[in-house]
Amino acid sequence: MQSKFMQAVEDKQTKGDVPAFQVGDTIIVHQKLLDGQKERTQAYEGDVIARSGNGIKEMMTVRKIVQGEGVERIFLIHSPRIARIEVKKAGQVRRAKLYYIRERLGKAVRIKGDTKRQQALDAANAKAAAEAAAVKAAAAKEQTAAEGGVSKRAAKRKAKAEAAAKK
């Protein structure tokens, strides 16, 4: 049992943009790294083989195959080092922990796809992409209005027409 004060502190630290994913899903974790003076993000793509903990202490274990060797990493879901998490493919499994995959090789490692959840994911991704495109278009329109309401292409055409008229 957690005290009200600890719960209040944890609620401030948890991320609200964590997507709903389950064990068996293929995800891409974008992790922030310090590269000298610059901060960059690095993607780590793999299958979720375990989730544990709750609240701010919630963790996930992600496994991928690199040059024929299995590599696992444990990420804190609400860590400030995690830029974002993307669900790439929905998987359907009947276990809470997929540790048995460690002993498997080749085709035996494959996880069956969950088509119903995948359709919902695809629809959500398409909707998010459409919203992002609309925001980008609105920003571009606002920028052209700030520059005088003329696009670069229209300005070039106008300049060509004026140069031709002077000759």
Image (cartoon, rainbow, N blue to C red):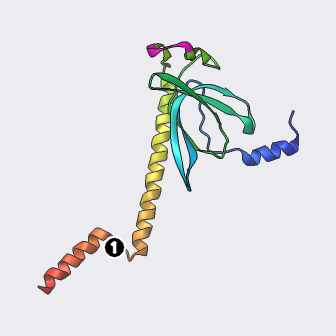
In the image, is residue 32 part of the stretch drawn in magenta? no
Q: Is residue 137 above or below residue 166?
A: above
First to last magenta residue range: 103-107
Residue pictured at 41% horizontal, 72% vertical: 145
In the image: residue 117, left or right of residue 145 = right
Give the residue at x 57% y 46%.
Answer: 33
For residue 26, say whether it is visible. no
Picture quadrant where residue 139 is located: bottom left
* Front residue of 121 and 13: 13
**Which is more toward the observer, 143 or 79?**
79
Closer-to-camera residue (23/146): 23
Residue 104 is inside the magenta segment = yes
Task: Residue 103: give x, y in percent of width and height.
Answer: 55, 13
Residue 106 locus on image (x, y percent): 44, 15
Quadrant of the rendering where the C terminus is positioned: bottom left
Q: Residue at x 54, y 26 (%)?
A: 71
- Give residue 2's quadrant in the image: top right
Residue 86 versus residue 115 in the image, above or below:
below
SS state under label 1: loop
| Mark 1 residue crowding within 10 angstroms, few (<14) / some (14–19) / many (20+) | some
**Picture mark count:** 1
Q: Is the N terminus in the top left, top right, bottom left or bottom right quadrant?
A: top right
Res. 51 visible in picture:
yes
Left or right of residue 149, residue 50 in this image:
right
Give the amino acid at mark 1.
Val
Where residue 163 appears, as percent x and y from the top left, is 17, 81
Left or right of 153 on screen, residue 136: right
**Which residue lies under the disc numbered 1?**
150
